[in-house]
Image (cartoon, helix red, strand yellow):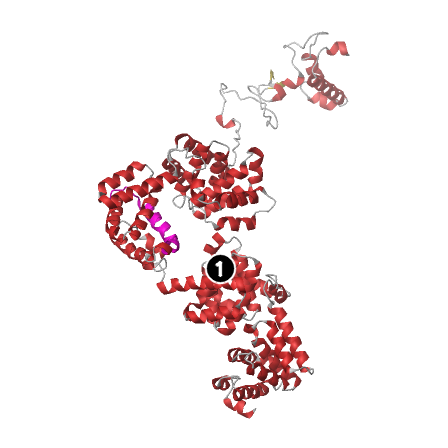
């Protein structure tokens, strides 16, 4: 068999086998054979496969499967697999991708051409952005052209990805020479606020800190270099000094990023003359360092004030070739006008001329004014009238057309939100000192006396905002102290409306606060929830606060989180412990102490000993709780012995009229609920009010509204 088959291919052997089987099957059916014009056996005999014993099958040999009857009845040779040929039908299912279409065939139809599927890769916008900024950075390192780099980045769009640009710029510079490091710092200063938002620069440096461990693998001194970049950013005023403290809260202490922050703080920013040291660290390898530009600007402005030559000053500004840094010209010119008031008109003339010539762009002018506005508090320490002078310059600049009106819109109508009323400014300065002293001494009575001495109760909401803002940027001890202080202030000198207004002010500025305090939203929700638990706010007050905020702002979300915290199971206990009870007595502990000392006194204790226990609490702002619990206990026990204790506390000056009034008020507000357990609560309370007024604990005006009913209730009791 092997000799007869020769070198048949596997496909040919299979065809031969099938044909043989078909012959055997058909031969057993005479009807089929007789009805067929040509039997398979005849076909095989006429078109047999001729294969030599050795060698390949000749071309003349035609296999059975390649023979097909044409429309004319003749047998013609067809294509492989029976797929067509002139005058043939083609295969039953002619879908074989290997079949070829003859474009020279008279019957050729272009519609028979097979479809070509072209694959397309879906690109990630972030990946495209990263590739594009690498080219921008490489070109900048090659040319040193800040304006081109800024223009390219602006045209690239995708501003949401700018933190990645910060990360890539610094990481690429870290692996290069000092020249590129200096160039990177100069570019960051140029892009700040104009092209890249301050918050995005902070986010970019946070990303660098988070990837410090990876950078250290490729760059041996990555920690020191990145620390220097951060210090340089602080010196160049594109990162706030508080950035280091806030970043430490989010970076693991075991990471290289935390080490970077420590190095920046201790090795660079804490050193004497650190600004000069940091700015000269890379040797000013780029064409012009920021410090050199600042010095040239200061020199040309001083020279201008002396000679008054506006044309020459504009020429010097133009020759600096740093149009991206003209905001520094604006800022320093305004400061000079405040320092030398006789030169104010000259300085304003220069700025107007530079604006009209197109030398200083509108955006650079606004940026210069904005930078000065941000530093006014510090400037006022050297120039007391700085804020008033700045406020007087703004309307003139706008009316003369060289300061865009958008500056007024961004800073508040007529600049009043930017330049605060002198009285409010002084109040803020005073209360910051008062709050710092309180955090140091934990002396609530002294703080209350200090606020009363200020005599500005209309600014109570401002105090609350400042208190919580300062506490949020400190440890849990100060947060606990702030919550305890709120309870005391609500009792002594703050109304519920003051508290509500203060929280509204806080929540309205929550987004700005979050730029400096990363977890501000969570902490604000805890302060709100704690205020409700401490009875400083009622749950309905949260509804009022929420209704005064835009529905889609982060402050509204904070209020919703506070509601969720309060609604949770065992919320009271958890929220009271949210700051860890870091100051004196926690409020809940104080309540337990008060209850125990009153129970001990009621069971046969001595008045003087009970008074000493109250005094040992050391929480005079919380003595209204003593009054409240003593009155409730007197109602429950039907024993007026508690009145003797209150009388002694009043005689010794231990509990003031103010605290007595607050305690009686709290009982009055809860009389309806109290009456469910003590049926004659209202009658007893009326008697206690009358008794307290006779003894001088309460003012006579309290009795007429003591129970919310008619005065007859009090007299009847």
Q: Is residue 82 left or right of residue 384?
A: right
Rendering coords of residue 395 (x, y %): 28, 56
- Name the one closer to the observer, 439 or 551: 439
Rendering coords of residue 53 (x, y %): 73, 7
Dot 1, crowdedness within 10 Å: few (<14), some or many (≥20)? many
Q: Is residue 587 left or right of residue 175?
A: right
Residue farthest front in this picture = 272
Screen quadrant of the C terminus: bottom right
- Name the one closer to the observer, 91 or 159: 159
Place residue 353 in its image quadrant: top left
Q: Is residue 357 magenta?
A: yes
Rendering coords of residue 541 (x, y %): 51, 69
Rendering coords of residue 532 (x, y %): 55, 68
Look at the picture and state if 237 lies above or below 589.
above
Q: Is residue 231 magenta?
A: no
Disc 1, SS:
helix
Screen quadrant of the N terminus: top right
- Name the one closer to the observer, 604 or 462: 604
Q: Is residue 19 left or right of residue 284?
A: right
Q: Which region is colored magenta?
A: 356-380
Residue in view at x 53 percent, y 31 percent: 117
Residue in view at x 40 percent, y 46 percent: 193
Look at the picture and state if 611 lies above or below 575.
below
Q: Mark 1 sits on what residue?
A: 469
Let me know if residue 324 appears in the view.
Answer: no
Q: Main secondary structure of the magenta part?
A: helix
Let me know if residue 86 appears in the view.
Answer: yes
Residue in view at x 34 percent, y 60 percent: 416
């Amino acid at each position: 068999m092997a000799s007869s088959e020769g070198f048949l291919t596997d496909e040919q052997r299979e065809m031969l086998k099938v044909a043989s089987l078909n012959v055997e099957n058909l031969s057993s059916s005479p009807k089929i054979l007789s009805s067929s014009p040509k039997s398979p056996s005849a076909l095989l005999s006429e078109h047999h496969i001729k294969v030599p014993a050795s060698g390949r099958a000749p071309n003349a040999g035609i296999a059975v499967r390649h023979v097909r009857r044409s429309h004319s009845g003749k047998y013609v040779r067809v294509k492989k697999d029976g797929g067509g040929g002139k005058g043939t039908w083609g295969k039953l299912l002619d879908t074989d991708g290997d079949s070829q279409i003859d474009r020279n065939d008279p019957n050729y139809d272009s519609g028979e051409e097979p479809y070509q599927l072209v694959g397309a890769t879906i690109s990630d916008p972030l990946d495209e952005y990263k590739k594009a900024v690498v080219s921008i950075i490489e070109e900048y390192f090659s040319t040193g052209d800040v304006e081109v780099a800024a223009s390219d980045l602006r045209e690239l769009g995708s501003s949401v990805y700018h933190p990645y640009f910060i990360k890539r710029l610094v990481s690429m510079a870290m692996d290069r020479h000092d020249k590129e490091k200096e160039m990177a710092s100069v570019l960051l200063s140029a892009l700040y606020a104009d092209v890249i938002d301050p918050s995005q620069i902070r986010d970019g440096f946070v990303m660098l800190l988070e990837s410090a461990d990876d950078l250290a693998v490729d760059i041996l001194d990555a920690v020191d270099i990145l620390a220097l970049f951060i210090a340089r950013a602080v010196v160049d005023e594109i990162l706030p000094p508080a950035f280091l403290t806030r970043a430490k809260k989010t970076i693991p202490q075991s990471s290289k990023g935390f080490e970077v922050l420590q190095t920046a703080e201790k090795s660079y920013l804490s050193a004497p003359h650190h600004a000069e040291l940091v700015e000269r660290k890379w040797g000013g390898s780029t064409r012009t360092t920021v410090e050199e530009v600042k010095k040239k600007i200061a020199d040309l402005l001083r020279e201008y004030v002396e000679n008054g030559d506006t044309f020459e000053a504009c020429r010097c500004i133009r020759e600096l070739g740093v149009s991206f840094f003209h905001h520094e010209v604006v800022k320093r010119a305004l400061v000079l006008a405040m320092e030398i008031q006789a030169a104010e008109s000259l300085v304003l003339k220069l700025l107007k001329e530079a604006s009209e010539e197109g030398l200083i762009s509108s955006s650079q002018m606004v940026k210069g004014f904005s930078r000065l506005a941000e530093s006014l508090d510090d400037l006022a320490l050297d120039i007391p009238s700085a804020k008033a002078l700045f406020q007087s310059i703004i309307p003139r600049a706008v009316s003369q057309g060289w300061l865009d009106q958008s500056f007024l819109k961004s800073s508040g109508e007529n600049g009043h939100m930017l330049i605060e009323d002198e009285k409010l400014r002084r109040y803020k300065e005073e209360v910051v000192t008062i709050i710092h002293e309180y955090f140091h001494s934990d002396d609530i009575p002294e703080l209350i006396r200090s606020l009363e001495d200020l005599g500005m109760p209309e600014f109570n909401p401002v105090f609350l905002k400042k208190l919580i803002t300062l506490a949020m940027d400190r440890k849990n001890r100060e947060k606990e102290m702030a919550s305890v202080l709120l309870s005391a202030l609500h009792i002594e000198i703050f109304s519920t409306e003051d508290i509500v207004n203060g929280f509204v002010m806080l929540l309205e500025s929550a987004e700005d606060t979050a730029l400096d305090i990363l977890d501000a939203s969570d902490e604000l929700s805890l302060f709100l929830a704690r205020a409700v638990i401490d009875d400083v706010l009622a749950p309905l007050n949260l509804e009022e606060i929420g209704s005064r905020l835009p529905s889609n702002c982060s402050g509204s979300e904070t209020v919703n989180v506070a509601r969720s915290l309060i609604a949770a199971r065992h919320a009271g206990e958890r929220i009271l412990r949210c700051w860890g009870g870091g100051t004196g007595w926690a409020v809940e502990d104080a309540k337990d102490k008060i209850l125990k000392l009153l129970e001990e006194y009621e069971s046969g204790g001595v008045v003087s000993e009970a008074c000493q226990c109250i005094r040992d609490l050391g929480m005079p702002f919380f003595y209204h709780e003593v009054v409240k619990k003593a009155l409730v206990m007197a109602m429950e026990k039907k024993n007026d012995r508690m009145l003797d204790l209150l009388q002694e506390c009043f005689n010794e000056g231990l509990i003031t009229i103010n605290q007595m009034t607050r305690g009686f008020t709290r009982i009055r507000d809860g009389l309806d609920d109290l009456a469910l357990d003590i049926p004659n609560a209202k009658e007893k309370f009326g008697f206690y009010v009358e008794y307290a007024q006779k003894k001088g604990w309460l003012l006579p005006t309290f009795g007429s509204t003591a129970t919310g009913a008619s005065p007859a209730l009090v007299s009847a009791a």
